[in-house]
Amino acid sequence: MKIKKNIATSENGFIFNPSTGDSFSSNPIGAEILLFMKSGKTSLEIKEIILENYEVEPAQLERDWEDWLLQLKDANLLDL
Amino acid sequence: MKLRYERPYLKKMNVGVMNKFGSRSDFQPVKFIDGVSVKSLTDKYGSPVFVLSERQIRKNYQSAVRSFNTRYPKVQFAWSYKTNYINAVCNVFHQEGSWAEVVSGFEYHKAIGNGVAGNHIIFNGPEKKEADLKLAIENDSLIHIDHFEELYKLIDICEALNKKPRVAIRVNMDTGIYPLWDRFGFNYENGQAWNAILKIVGLGKMQLVGLHCHIGTFMLSTSAYAIATSKLCDLAMKCKNQLQNPIEYLDLGGGFPSTNTLKGSYLPGVDTVPPIDDFAEAITTTILGYGFQQNELPMLILETGRALIDDAGYLLGSVIANKQLSDGRRATILNFGVNLLFTSFWYDHHISPAQDFTHYTEETILYGPMCMNIDVIRESINLPLLSPGDLVVVHKVGAYNMTQWMQFISTRPAVVLIDETGQTHEIRQAETLKYMEIPESVPVHLQHKK
Amino acid sequence: MIEPIPYVIAITALNAIDSPGPGLAVIRALREGLGTGLRIIGLCYESLEPGIYLHGQVDKTYQIPYPTAGAGPLLERLQYVHEKEKLDLVIPNFDSELYNFIKISVDLNKLGIKTFLPSHKQLEIREKINLAKFGKKHNLLVPEDRIIFKADELEKVAADLGYPLVVKGKYYEASVVHTLEQASKAFSLLSVKWGLPVIAQKFVKGTEINIAALGDGKGNAISVIPMRKLYITDKGKAWAGVTLEDNTLLDLGRDFIKATHWKGGCELEIMKDAAGKLFIMEINPRFPAWVYLTAAAGQNQPAALVKMAFGELVEPFDSYQPGKMFVRYAWDHITDITEFQQISALGEL
């Protein structure tokens, strides 16, 4: 799962897709994950970091991760 | 110390319609009801659960009485049983001094069971069975006649019992509002109401003591009540002057709105619904200005239901799951649906989370758990990011939900009353399978062989 | 030389688009009438209201909750804006937001934010369903109408009023119909879209004239400027217009202000028939989008409103220039996507 190369993200959670013209915003954890994804970390690595830093059960994160990918796909931000 | 987790969330910035996605928050979590924690209520009584505030009910009642009492000398409220007839609720009203207003034999017997004196029960409605009418006559209850069939039936019963019951007629009329509730009672404009009065007074088998109307529900116009009052006053004057039959009371029925927001209305109910004071002003100034002698002023009866209890009721429930629909919209499934929240068909209910959250919100559809497509609590609502297991509080559900709820697919939950000291009382237990099956019987050939 | 007054004034309706809100016209009139010390705070609902991005006109913009959220959230948001900006005055310019602004005007005043608005009662008497009644009461001509709840009333109403007939939605939209079939169709469309009732109004043929007026709330018309629309867009908006000199129009404006004791700006939409009779078609409870023309013609209505809001005694204007004309034009303002993201996500720019 890779984020498209040309997607512009900012630390405060703004995302701009220059190929479609769409803008998005995300909550802080979403912004953090996006930056990790852009830096080339794998899903596994990112989930590990989240589990380490946030108060969340692995099962919950796993479900939310699926949902997150669906959101990214829906937003046309994934390089499939 | 780990950071507080929230599910990662992405939101498209729409052009045109503004994103409600800012540093501010329209929401506050509602963690307590009358000082009792929402979590403790669901822990103890299950989720979902209806919760009623006795303090709020009494406050509403006293304030409504004050609105009328300060303007008019003779005022009597009668609790509209169909709005919420759980006995504990009825008895709060009866303790406060309210009579009972019932619309069926079932409700009539409930009122008797609650210890309401027979002559403090108003018997309304289009269907009153013969046995119920007889009982009402024996108890000296106030019978409000709905149609000529009933009028003739009553005359027959009076002859058989050799009693002279106290009655009123229900009058329907044009008050400039739509729809006109002309299916109930006798019409004022076409003279039907006056004919019914002539018949009752002329035959002398019953005492015509009152006139009743009930012009609609969730009425937002106070002027309609002024018109209705003036038409009842006109009939009352004619009764006195032409028939020498003074009228003892005018019953203006119910219909005052609560502050819920009706679907399709542009502004929220809290800002636009007229306060009871405005209705009281319209009604009482009309009677006082109609020319009755001070000692002949009729008693004013009000059958207010919704406005006295809606905001005293809460429905607590839990999030079952979040979903993304095929078109990208978000959806949240709750553990209560239209089976319990009948009023979600006509209100956009205000719903609050019961735990802390960040200021990030998403627009979502709220579905109930019924396996039925129309089970929608809110077609669109902006809520913080809820997770399975989170609790929510639905506000202003005290009227009609605990009487119109459906036993469909699942059983109905407990109803809890928080008394004025903050103690909780289960005033209706959650239904069980066993309870539901008590009236059932299975023929021998269909019985499951053990 | 105008003495600069360092007022901070919040303005809504920054949507200077094809069917424009009056906000930018009000700002232009205020900047011209009140000098350079002015700080204009924009209040917006949507992220593409052009005024948000015109930093020369609007110093800073804050998003406010939609009217449907109610008066409470609006007050809360304005309190926040007030903490940052120390507002002196707010001038709302949308019909649909006025109810809430009037509702919170007392609270705003307590915070030190002034308003100069009509009352709820004044707002109500000019609503479409009440206008005919109002006209009758005050001897002002309003086309005869019927309030309709059921489609089967249309036949009788059409017989009473005759064709063509104007079928109007409760809040917005209208269509001119010539047959019962068209009338029924219009009824069902408008009742679905705007709810019941629907209004059927007698059709009046004539010239469309608009009047911008400003009342002091005591029955005096401080300014009345009539304008004839020279060209109308397909949305019914004036694209160009010219000020008129006609005492009957001025009198009508003054009569309306006197009858209602109107407080604040308003716009009367007038139809002048062949016989010269002036029918009031609609009354908008705020400044029109063309209100800058009043300033250009010599009666700066927005600036006069500000002065009255701050308690200054303002004498009614006694003259203006007829023949002043406006031509509306479109302009592509250039900005960067980050500005859009900023206002969209944070509600401030």
Image (cartoon, coloured by chain):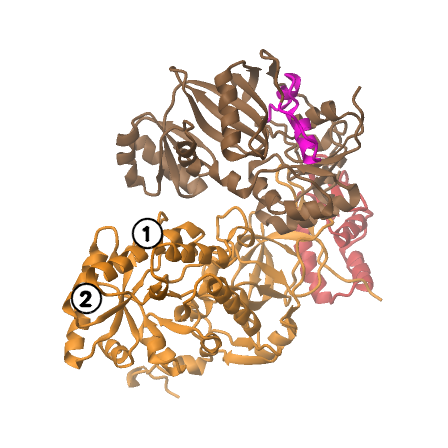
Chain colours: A red, B orange, C brown
Image position, residue B210 (x, y; %): 29, 66
Q: Residues within 10 Å of mark 1 (few under 14, many from 20)?
A: some
Q: Which quadrant holds residue B296? A: bottom left
Q: Nearer the viewer, residue B165 or B441?
A: B165
Q: Which quadrant holds residue C330? A: top right
Query: Residue A68 magenta-drawn?
Result: no
Residue highlighted by disc 2? B200
- Can residue C147 be seen at all in this image of the molecule? yes
Image position, residue B391 (x, y; %): 62, 67
Seen at 41% across and 59% down, the residue is B255
Residue C243 is marked as: none
Marks 1 and 2 in Cβ contact (< 8 Å): no
Residue highlighted by disc 1? B180
| Magenta highlight range | C289-316
- Compared with B376, C217 (above or below) is above
Amino acid type of the residue tagged 1 in the rendering: Leu
Q: Nearer the viewer, residue C94 or A60?
A: C94
Q: Nearer the viewer, residue B316 or B200?
A: B200
Disc 1/disc 2 C-alpha distance (Å) = 25 Å
Query: Residue C304 magenta-drawn?
Result: yes
- Can residue A3 be seen at all in this image of the molecule? no
Amino acid type of the residue tagged 2 in the rendering: Ile
Q: Nearer the viewer, residue A66 or C216?
A: C216
Between disc 1 and disc 2, the foreground one is 2
Tag 1 secondary structure = loop
Seen at 79% across and 52% down, the residue is A32
